Amino acid sequence: MNTAFSAGSLVSARGRDWVVLPESEPDLLVLRPLGGADDDIAAVFPAFEAVTSSEFAPPSPDDLGDADAAGLLRSALRIGFRAGAGPFRSLAGIAVEPRAYQLVPLMMALRQRTVRLLISDDVGIGKTVEAGLIASELLAQGGARGLAVLCSPALAEQWQAELRTKFAIDAELVLASTVSRLERGLDLGQSLFDRHPHVIVSTDFIKSTRHRDDFVRHCPDLVIVDEAHTCVAADDAAASQNQLRFELLQRVAADAERHLLLVTATPHSGKESAFRNLLGLLRPELAAVDLGSDAGRRTLAQHFVHRKRADVRQYLTRADGLADDSLAEETSFPTDRQFKDETYKLTPAYRALLDDAIAYASERVTAADRRGRREARIAWWSAIALLRSLVSSPRAAAQTLRTRSATAAATTAEEADRLGAPLTGDFSDSEALEGLDAAPGAEAAEVEHAGARLAELADRAAELEGPTGDRKLAALVTQLKALLKDGYHPIVFCRYIPTAEYVAEHLDGKLGRRTVVRAVTGTLSPQQRIERIEELARDAGDDPAARRVLVATDCLSEGVNLQHHFDAVVHYDLAWNPTRHDQREGRVDRYGQQRTVVRVVTLYGSDNGIDGKVLDVLIRKHRQIRKDLGISVSVPDAASSGVTDAIVEWLLLRGRDGEQGSLFDADEYRAIDRKAAALAADWQSAAEREKTSRSRFAQHAIRPEEVAREVAAVRDTLGRAQETRSFVRRSLRALDADLRDDAAQPGDFTADLSGTPAGLRDALAPVVGGDAVETGRPVRFRATAAVDRGEAALVRTDPAVAALAGYVLNAALDAQAAGPRPARRCGVVRTRAVTTRTTLLVARYRFHLTLPSRTGTRQLVAEDARLLAFAGAPGNARWLPAEDALALLDATADANTDPEFGRRTMAKVLDDLPAVADHLHGYGEELAAELLASHRRVRSASGEIVRGLAVTAQGRPDVLGAYVYLPAPTAAGGTA
């Protein structure tokens, strides 16, 4: 670079110090503030602005700190790093601290020239974070220039928020509702995928052929597919939209240079062909590879990560083959789900209504059978809609009875099936949950005199509203009161919008004055749903006696994480597919849930002819398989539908005479049992295949010792969790915050920040809220990385922790700063931890990195902070091992130091520090060699990406801090 300032050199401009970046030209300098982030990069024209070489100012002996000063300075520096020199370029700059096991997919990705991965970890493990880590790293290294996430429209805004807040990736939403606005801003002939490099594309958007073709032509070079199992076709009978998405992904995957991440917790869904199609998207040969052979499994292992909670709950321990537990990490998932099935019986009036409705539906089905197949299918779906709404709630029944069936518009039997199945069934491969919680219709216009009869049934249903006529509602109130008494905050899941609204209305005011009830249904947009939940949390407040109850439809059963506010689930309506129950429960049973046991209550009618069989054949069987395997196995849809269809058929065709035991004669009842047995056999077979696949495809591409080595390197550079927790507590106390420990959650605490310096309050206000820092509302700091909005995680990448570290570091560097300054750049401490004079240095190194990638070579400047310690005088230094230097941070002051003596001692050491310059420089060269080896190791399987890799120490390190430890006098008058 033909400029007076080389990359990595230190310059002074605009009243501050900067680091010169490799993008600089002779007439244009690209600068990053010393110790700053990429967001603060600026361009300076030396011809118009004064730019001079700069050296970092040495510490001043007139500004001595106490025994904590060195540790706080080092921690503040490390927490503030956003441009680390290690092989994981993005980890220093993201706002999430990944678990060690979440680094495995990232390490797998970095060993591939073109990343092709199927991430199939269990629900709640953190697949979104794993995919985000890979995307962030590829973009940071230059391996990818753009990103597209394909997901359901209900999850698009959540993906956008996750990428923006955790990974600093600002992605544009490309939805059916935003396309027109986005296209109006395009230049002539420009694609919106060229205009916006990072996009989140909803699956409904790609239904349009024009948009689908445009996406394929201008698709970014990195694509993430969420819930990928919904985007593959198992056979020719697959849903049309699944087929369209599969064809799209085939075209996207056809570009061998495109990175592709497929994300799903259910890669099999009981369908081997669908699983093979997923694998074929990664590499065509995987669709036919022999997975029964060792060679086939080794090939798949490079592209497939498939773990359950038990695999990662305890990680990097002796059980994983490591020498010790020094890097062990425990992830707090709930240990169990406690199930309780509660029954209720219909009131006489409700029973009479159900009998009359079944009689009507039976007549309709019988009459329609004589008119043709189209009419028969319309009558069939209308009958199911009527029965499901009747057992849901009086309000859902009334609305269904007064609404025209969507299937009535069908012109063929096949169209009737396509329209009716999603609205009345709960198939595991439903294309989207949006719009499926609306109450279905039961009225068909061509049925003579049907309107009056349905209206009469609807009026009777409406009269049953309330706990007197609806014993199901009364049973719910009883169960909720028990949960609330035990301190739980439940979510009540309903099948239909009218039911959820009805339940919420009747619960309001019935559960105690400190209980807040809200409803969230498909009538709200995805963003409004999140806002409603946050409103519920705010209204309940922090009062330990307050309780939260959320009534929701299945619009919240996928994707939305609710573990911070809720810890119990009530299934008010039975789903006809147990996978839906698992999805509901998974909203609260996931990483970050504070409860060790999540409670699940299932309400079912003992005498409505449907719930009992669904519970026995589907729900309980699913629980047993999950208990046996530790994971969920999707029910085979066809066999499941066979059972529920059989139940409905006999209800309709045999009628009812008051007691469930007399509904069916022996032969007919055995027919249902035969179908149930066939389902159980298919399901058990699927479970065995899943069990086998879990053992056959267990993640062996990256060994635990490989992960441990990289985790240790990352923690040595960026700090360990305990260091961050200690730093936050010590700094906040030193800055006059009022801390109170949370007795219920060891390690958590709240902080009143109103008494802290104005500069810190200004830095924290955008993160935790202006009202918190000014009014004294306690801010909760939690030991887990999974926190809710308004809380702070005790991890280095949390915005509140980063703001605190920035304030502490800046105050340490500015001796004129007003208010308390917890960290100082030098100090003299008398301690029994040393027997001879020992000096500890906090040094900041800069490195010039040359990182080759398939898109070209990137030149970067990165930083690292290290502790170095020597005994004796600088001119005759005896350098100590790294662990001894680190131990000095824990040294305590065991005797007072006279201020003037301390100043003279410090001044003498600082004057003699040039004598150790050669050692500091040589140590920088050693660090550069270690970093180069680490970069090569992480990319070991991709020789092309390793060639040309270089790491060079840049100039002399900055000595940020110097601390002298002197032996403390003993009781006998000597020194320790």
Image: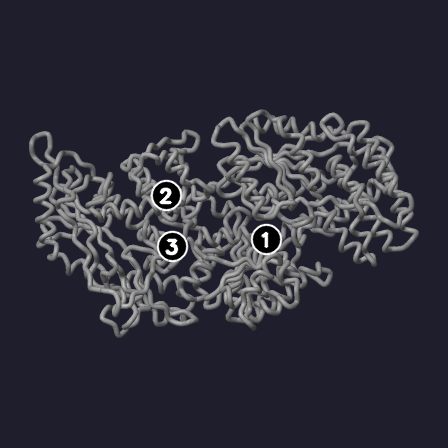
**Are discs 1 and 2 less than 8 Å apart at CB?**
no
Q: Amino acid at mark 1?
A: Thr
- Under tag 3, what secondary structure? loop
Choose mark 1 or mark 2, whichever is in front: 2
- Residue 482 % position (x, y): 60, 26
User: What mark, if any, has residue 764 been given in the picture?
Assistant: 2
Query: Nearer the N terminus, badge 1 or badge 3?
Result: 3
Q: Is residue 362 left or right of residue 93?
A: right
Instruction: State the SS at label 1.
Output: helix
Percent across and percent down for residue 508 are 63, 30
Residue at mark 3? 93
Cα gap from disc 1 to disc 2, whole angstroms: 51 Å
The Cα atoms of the two marked residues, 2 and 3, are separated by 18 Å
Q: Amino acid at mark 2?
A: Leu
Please identify the quarter of the rendering in which residue 514 is found: top right
- Mark 1: few/some/many CA within 10 Å (<14, 14-19, 20+): few
Q: Vertically, is 429 above or below 520?
A: below
Residue 510 picture location, percent across and down: 63, 26
Q: Which residue is mark 1?
A: 692
Residue 164 higher or lower than 575, as above or below:
below
In this view, the mark in front (2 or 3) = 2
